[in-house]
Image: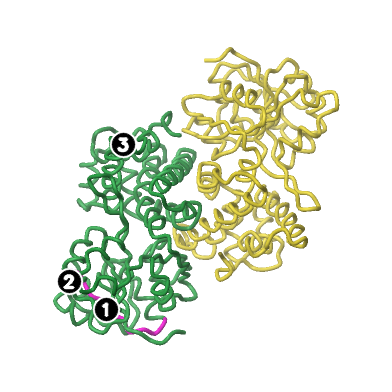
Chain colours: A green, B yellow
C-alpha cells in the first residue's frame, strides 16, 4: 500500500465520481469537485453521500466541493484527476490548468481526439500540456485512462482492467500505485496516441454496431448477431487503418482498449439506444429528441474524426473508401442517409 | 449469377443445412445428406421441408438423402460442402473422402484444430488433404469457412460476412462465386492457419468470457460488463500470441474472424450457457448434465489446444504464463479449480 495522498477529482459526473472508489479504498484523502453542471450532484452527495446519476452510495470520507471552491479543493493535492467529458475540455483548460502547481500531475478520464482543419488528430493529454500557462510548461505531466470501464461497475468494485497512458513513465507509475486495487487493474503504456485513438473510436463504432440491433434485432434486441458481428470486425479493421495512418501502434486494437472496450460500450447505455433508434429508421433529430437532446460522445467523436478524414481525403492522404462504416455513421447522424449499412462497400 | 451447379452438403446439422439457403437462392441444385446422426432431421425435412433443430423452413427444391445414399448424393456434384462438426471429422475422412472424384472440391464448415503429442496444431483442410486416398492426392482442393455466422441467422438471410480460406485460390474463388449473395458476403484468403486458429479459438474464449457472466452478471445477465470486456480483450491478446507462435498472420484477430466472431459466439447459445453455469459455481460435471451431456466444440478445442501448449511448454517452446485465461478455462472444465479467473496473472 503506498503512502496516503490527497487526490482531487475535478468533475463529479459518473466516471469522475467512480474514481473515488479505488482512491478511497486505498486510503487516500479524496476531494470531489463539481463542474458548473454538477451542483445538484454535489448538493445531494453532501447531504447523504448518494450519487444521483451513478445511483450508488459513494464511499465514506469524501470531501465535496462546488466549483466555487475549486482553488481550495486543488490546493495541496498530490494528483488531480480530470473527470470531465470531451465537452468539458475547454472549461478544464481555462479554469483548472491555471490553478495547477508544479508537480501536481493530471490524470484524465476524458475520451476523445481533437481535430484540426488540416486533418490532424491529437490526443487530449497533448492538447492540455500545450494549453498550460507558460510558467507551468514542462512542470506538469498529463496522463490519461483508457479501457473498458463503465462507471457504475467500477463504483460497485467489479473486476476492471484499464490502461494508463502518458509520456512521463514515472508519473504514470505513480498514478498507478495510487489507484490500483484488487479489482482495478492498471497496465501502464507510453502509447498515448494509440490508446486515445482506441478510447475515442470505440464510441463512434459502438454507434455503428448498434444500428444493426435496430435494423435486425427482434423485440428483445437479441437477434441480428451475424450483422453485429460483421460490423464489430469491420470496426476493428477501420480503427487499425486509422491508427496506422496516425503512425501509432496497433497493438491495442486486438486487446482490451479497443475490442474489449467496444464490446462493453455496445451494452453501455445511450450510444446503444441511439444506434438502435437510428437502425429502426428514426432520423437523428427524432432520435436525439427521444434521448432528451443530449449530445453523446459517440456523435461528437464521429463528427470530429470524419471532418479530419475528409480533409485528409481531399489532400490525397487517406482513402475514404477505407472507412466505409465510419462514413456511413456520419451520414446517418447528419441525416443525409437512413441507416442501411453499405455491405458491399465494407472491406 | 454463375452457371447453375450441383452442390452436395454432407451433414444436415444446423450449419450445414443453413448453407442450403445461399446455395438455393443462387439457383443451384442442392442435395442435403444426413450423417448417421441426422436421420430424424432428414425424415422431417423430407416430410414438409422443416428443419427441426434450425427451427426453420428450408428453401424449396432441396433433395434430401440419408447416409445410406451418400454415394448417390455425391455423384456428379460440382462442390461438396463438409457440414460436420469437429466430432465428425474422422467419420468424414473415412466415409466421404474415398467417394470423391477428381475435381470435386470440398468446402468445410468444420471448426477446430487437430492437436498432436508434440504440440503441433494443424487446420482441418490440411488434415483432410493428407487423408485423401492416394489416387486422389493433389486432385481435390480443400477450402474452409470461417467467420461469425450463426446458422439460424444465415437461414433467415441476415447480413453475414465470412471468410473462405484455402491454398488453391481458384477453388476458393469458385466456391465464393457459387455461394455469395446479397446477404452472404465472402472474403477469400490464403491464410488457412490464421483463419482456422481464429475460428477454433473463439469458441474456447467465448467460454472464458461467459464465465464472467455467471460470476458477476445479474439475473438478467446484463451486468458484469467490465469483467467481460477485460476478458474479451485478454482473449484477443492470447490468440494473437498463439497465432504468432504458429507462424501465421495475426491480421484476422482485430477483424471479423476473431473479434467479430467472438462477439457473436458469446451470445450464440450453449457455450454461453455452459460458461455462465461454471461462473455461477457449478462443476463441469453438473453443468454438462444440465446441458444434456452434449460435449461442446468450445470444450473440445480448449482441451486440444491446452494439451498442445502443455507439450510445447514442457519443451520450452512457449510460456504457459502467456495464456493465463485459456489455462484457467482448461482447469475449470476439467474440474481442477472453480471458476475464479486469475486477474493478477492476466497480461
Which circle, 2 or 1, is nearer the viewer?
1
Tag 1 residue? A102
Q: Outermost residue toward the right?
A: B134
Element under disc 2: helix
Name the side, left or right, on which A64 lies relative to B227: left
Residue B182 image offset from top left, x and y in percent? 46, 25
Query: What crowding class fits label 1: few (fewer than 14 Cα within 10 Å), some (14-19), or many (20 or more)?
Result: few
Disc sitting over residue A313 in the figure: 3
Query: What crowding class fits label 3: few (fewer than 14 Cα within 10 Å), some (14-19), or many (20 or more)?
Result: some
Q: B59 or B331: which is nearer to us?
A: B331
Cα separation between marks 3 and 2: 43 Å
Q: Quadrant of residue A145?
A: bottom left
Disc sitting over residue A39 in the figure: 2
Sequence-first tag of 2 and 1: 2
Residue B245 image offset from top left, x and y in percent? 66, 52
Answer whether labels 3 and 2 touch (C-beta < 8 Å): no
Sequence-first tag of 3 and 2: 2
Q: How many marks?
A: 3
Q: In the figure, A329 relative to B79: above or below?
A: below
Amino acid at each position: 500500500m503506498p503512502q496516503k495522498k490527497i487526490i482531487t477529482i475535478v468533475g463529479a459526473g459518473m466516471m469522475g465520481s467512480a474514481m473515488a472508489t479505488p482512491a478511497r479504498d486505498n486510503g487516500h484523502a479524496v476531494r470531489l469537485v463539481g463542474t458548473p453542471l454538477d451542483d445538484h450532484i454535489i448538493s445531494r452527495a453532501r447531504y447523504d453521500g448518494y450519487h444521483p446519476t451513478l445511483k450508488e452510495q459513494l464511499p465514506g470520507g469524501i470531501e465535496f466541493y462546488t466549483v466555487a471552491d475549486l482553488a481550495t479543493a486543488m490546493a495541496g493535492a498530490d494528483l488531480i484527476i480530470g473527470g470531465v467529458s470531451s465537452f468539458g475540455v475547454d472549461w478544464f483548460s481555462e479554469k483548472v490548468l491555471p490553478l495547477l502547481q508544479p508537480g501536481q500531475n493530471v490524470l484524465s478520464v476524458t475520451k476523445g481526439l481533437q481535430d484540426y482543419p488540416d486533418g490532424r488528430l491529437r490526443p487530449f493529454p497533448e492538447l492540455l500540456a500545450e494549453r498550460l500557462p507558460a510558467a507551468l510548461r514542462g512542470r506538469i505531466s498529463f496522463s490519461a485512462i483508457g479501457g473498458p470501464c463503465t462507471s457504475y461497475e467500477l463504483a460497485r468494485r467489479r473486476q476492471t482492467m484499464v490502461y494508463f497512458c502518458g509520456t512521463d513513465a514515472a508519473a504514470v507509475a505513480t498514478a498507478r500505485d495510487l489507484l490500483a486495487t484488487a479489482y482495478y487493474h492498471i497496465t501502464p503504456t507510453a502509447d498515448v496516441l494509440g490508446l486515445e485513438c482506441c478510447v475515442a473510436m470505440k464510441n463512434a463504432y459502438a454507434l455503428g454496431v448498434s444500428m444493426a440491433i435496430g435494423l435486425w434485432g427482434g423485440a428483445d434486441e437479441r437477434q441480428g448477431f451475424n450483422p453485429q458481428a460483421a460490423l464489430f470486425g469491420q470496426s476493428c479493421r477501420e480503427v487499425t487503418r486509422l491508427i496506422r495512418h496516425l503512425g501509432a501502434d496497433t497493438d491495442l486494437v486486438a486487446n482490451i482498449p479497443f475490442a474489449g472496450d467496444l464490446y462493453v460500450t455496445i451494452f453501455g447505455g445511450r450510444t446503444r439506444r441511439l444506434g438502435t433508434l437510428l437502425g429502426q429508421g428514426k432520423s437523428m433529430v427524432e432520435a436525439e429528441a427521444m434521448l432528451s437532446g443530449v449530445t453523446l460522445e459517440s456523435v461528437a467523436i464521429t463528427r470530429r474524426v470524419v471532418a479530419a478524414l475528409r480533409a485528409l481525403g481531399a489532400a490525397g492522404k487517406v482513402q475514404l473508401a477505407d472507412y466505409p462504416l465510419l462514413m456511413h455513421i456520419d451520414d446517418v447522424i447528419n441525416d443525409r442517409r437512413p441507416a442501411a449499412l453499405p455491405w458491399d462497400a465494407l472491406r
